[in-house]
Amino acid sequence: MNPDVTVTVIVYNDAARLPRAVESVRRQTHANIEIIISDDHSTDETPDVARKLASQDPRIRHLRLPRNSGGCSAPRNRALEIARAPYVMFLDSDDELTDNAVELLLSAHREREIDFAMGAVVRVREDSGRRTKWMPHLVAERRTVIGVESEPRLLFEHLSTSKMYARTFLDRYDLRFPEGIHYEDQLFSAQAYCLAKEFTIIPEAVYRWHIAPYAATDAASISNQRHKLDNVRDRVHVQRLIDDFLVESGHGGLREDKDYKFLKHDFRMYAGDLPYRDEEWLSSFADITTPYLETLSPAAYARLPRMERVVLQLIRERRFPEARLAARGLGRAVAPRQVTPDAEGHTYWGAGLPTSTWARRELDVSDLELDIRPFRSAQFRHEITELTRGPGASIDLTIRTYDPGLRLPVGPHRASLLLTPGRQRLKVPFRLTPVRPGVYEGHVHLDLATAPVPHHGFAGVRHPLLRIEHQGQPNTAVLLAPLSFPPLTTRINYHTSTAPHRVTIEPEGRGPGRLQIRWQPVGITARLVRPVVRRVARPRVRRAVRLMRSALR
């Protein structure tokens, strides 16, 4: 009997995780499937693992490429050449399918004649186990889309692995993955969206995407290798290929939406890393991206949040130190250090007025309402300018606060540092005193031995917040740390030594670069107390405890 669905698992030097991926396909609730392990000429134990897996299940076929292609496209394309089923799916060796993924997507195909079906993707962080849906707003409801022009926002969901394709659809248009480049999913998916007459979206999760944000450089996924300039070149190159395809296929009307997707998703990924890049890297980055940025639709820029537009313009003007400063505030409501007003009442980023019409439009931060928005949501910028180790488990911080909207009257102001390891909060009051108009400075002595860590211990990371109080109104915002300083680690014996912890103070290392404090239980707390608490905290145990309490009332 021929299989109903072929699932291709591509792999390269991933012997440890390949069995997990394959097992997620073997345990599918729809069993009539074909599994092709497509090995991109691995040099580790992957071939042996693949052969062993194939020997355990007649549904598994092992395909090994004669030479390494350096990407995902060739192993997928070679597997398509030998696939026997009328429907196909793709899986990466470091990810998994949900148990009923094949059943759900195949059911969508059998309900009506469609070109592909797609479901939700769950992102699983390897470091914390936290699970979140990828682009949840795009897959919130079940529906059949007739032409992507009716929902161009779907271009944001560019993964090829969350979909099941009709083989006749792929063959009709000779739709294959472009070989020799990275970000092949983006071009393949853009082509699939545009060429499909109808496709169905289901809200159920079909794919588990494992994210390892702190993986070693040689083991990091392509999307986590943003420090490589070739990575930037490949991403821009793929965008140009998509642009050409949109024109050639008669879908030029999607260009603004596609440009917006590039600015909001692709460029935004690099923008968050800019504070950690040196001048040479930033110069090369601008050389690669600026010519392409100049081809994008002005309407796409206009749809972006203001601070993302500021970062883009500063890169285009090669104002790299300012671009780093602006990038530290992305998504965190962090104010500029300085703004400049003009005679017409507009306010611009930085110490001078823009010189061109385009720059004035992009660097105009008047819409941030720095001077008039309610104090609770007013934007300030809090930076640690000096950090020194104090006695015991304490640190001394010098903090500079920038108030470009001049919301605070001249004079000292009450402030406090807030830290919550567990359910209780540590509040350390201090004063901010004026340095010059719009700039204040304060000194904080933070003793981590006084942090209210629970008796059963706390394992996790916290980022202290800074709160200012003015006329009875609080304003709470993030605290930016120096981007690099040696981590400070100490042992703290909380609760008279019954809850020992290793505590590390460090820069965040990514994103805005907040001050980061990390707790790790040690000794008896780690070996005995926390395992017991975790068992008690399980939902079934909590429900049983609640029932017992009710019965005893």
Image (spheres, grey):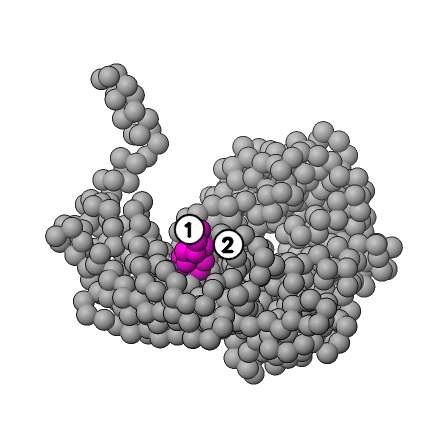
Residue 15 seen in the figure: no
Which quadrant of the view contains residue 281? bottom right
Residue 253 seen in the figure: yes
For disc 2, the marked residue is: 375
- Percent x, y for residue 373? 57, 55
Element class at badge 2: helix
Range covered by the magenta-colored residues = 466-478
Q: Quadrant of the N terminus?
A: top right
- Percent x, y for residue 447? 24, 62
Q: Quadrant of the C terminus?
A: top left
34 or 127, which is in the foreground?
Answer: 127
Question: At x 57% / y 75%, what residue is drawn?
Answer: 322
433 or 446, which is in the foreground?
Answer: 433
- Percent x, y for residue 334? 52, 62
Question: Is residue 330 magenta-colored?
Answer: no
For disc 1, the marked residue is: 472
180 or 514, which is in the foreground?
Answer: 514
Q: Is residue 223 left or right of residue 481?
A: right
Q: Is residue 448 left or right of residue 368?
A: left
Q: Is residue 419 above or below residue 340?
A: above
Element class at badge 1: loop
Dot 1 amino acid type: Gly
- Percent x, y for residue 311? 62, 69
Q: What is the CA distance from the residue labelled 1 to the residue labelled 2?
A: 10 Å
164 or 311, which is in the foreground?
Answer: 311
Q: Is residue 313 left or right of residue 480?
A: right
Which quadrant of the view contains residue 85? top right
Dot 2 amino acid type: Phe
Question: At x 75% / y 55%, what residue is drawn?
Answer: 257
Question: At x 55% / y 78%, what residue is drawn?
Answer: 321
